[in-house]
Amino acid sequence: MKKILLLAGDYVEDYEAMVPFQMLQMAGYDVHSVCPGKKPGESVKTAVHDFEGDQTYSEKRGHNFAINYDFDQVNPADYAGLVIPGGRAPEYLRLNQGLIEIVKQFFGSGKPVAAICHGPQILVAAGVLRGKKCTAYPAVKPDIVMAGATWVEPAPSADNAVVDGMLVTAPAWPAHPQWMASFIKMLGGTVSAGK
């Protein structure tokens, strides 16, 4: 069974952690959720972000998301791919040098990486976006552009994903079907279309 690494932290976006975690398990992957400073059996708090007509997303307290693997034991060589959810967690997770090194190793080895919403903030901090095409939550656009990447506008319904080599990015959780389908294909899996 292929292993996938999922980076989480307190106030990670609820849907962007839980839904990919479950979708990847359903597709036959062993998903390790990790958080610096947390041990297996502990959890992180999540935030539910929604689009309700305000100038930015609204935020409500979500569920607890279980951490099932020890961050300090992560060896990127053991994993087929990396998932970086959004929410508020990326803004402080990007300050953890060990986490940044993990991200750099995934890119250095050419393994698939999926980042969504504010997740690309971690990619900016890792210095891996130069020359890439990507998208994210619109407020992250200045960071992505300053990192030397080409910004791709989110669809009006925020349901598009952008693929550039082994990187797939998306603006928000409405893009889950396209985002995860692209990631699973990069991993060598098959996805059948709904509808």
Image (cartoon, rainbow, N blue to C red):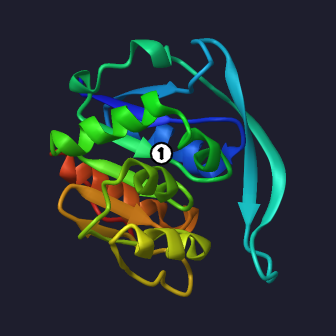
Residue at 53% x, 18% y: name it.
68
For the residue carrying disc 1, how many other residues have a C-alpha within 10 Å: few (<14), some (14-19), or many (20+)?
many
Residue 141, placed above or below residue 192: below
Residue at x 56% of width, y 24% of height: 36
Residue sticking out furthest to the bottom: 156
Label 1, secondary structure: give it.
Answer: helix
| Residue 21 relative to residue 51: left or right | left
135 versus 45 height, above or below: below
Position of residue 144 relative to residue 120, above or below, is below
Is 63 left, or right, of 29 in this rendering?
right
**x and y percent of residue 95 in the render?**
56, 40
The residue positioned 62% from the left and 18% from the top of the image is 38
**Residue 165 x, y percent position in the rendering:** 17, 61
Q: Quadrant of residue 140?
A: bottom right
- Quarter of the image containing the C terminus? bottom left
Q: Kindly indicate the quadrant of the structure image that contains residue 161.
A: bottom left
Instruction: Name the one closer to the observer, 59 or 92.
Output: 92
In the rendered image, which residue does mark 1 sit on? Answer: 20
Tag 1: residue type? Pro
Position in image of residue 3 (x %, y %): 30, 26
Q: Position of residue 147 (x, y in %)?
A: 39, 67
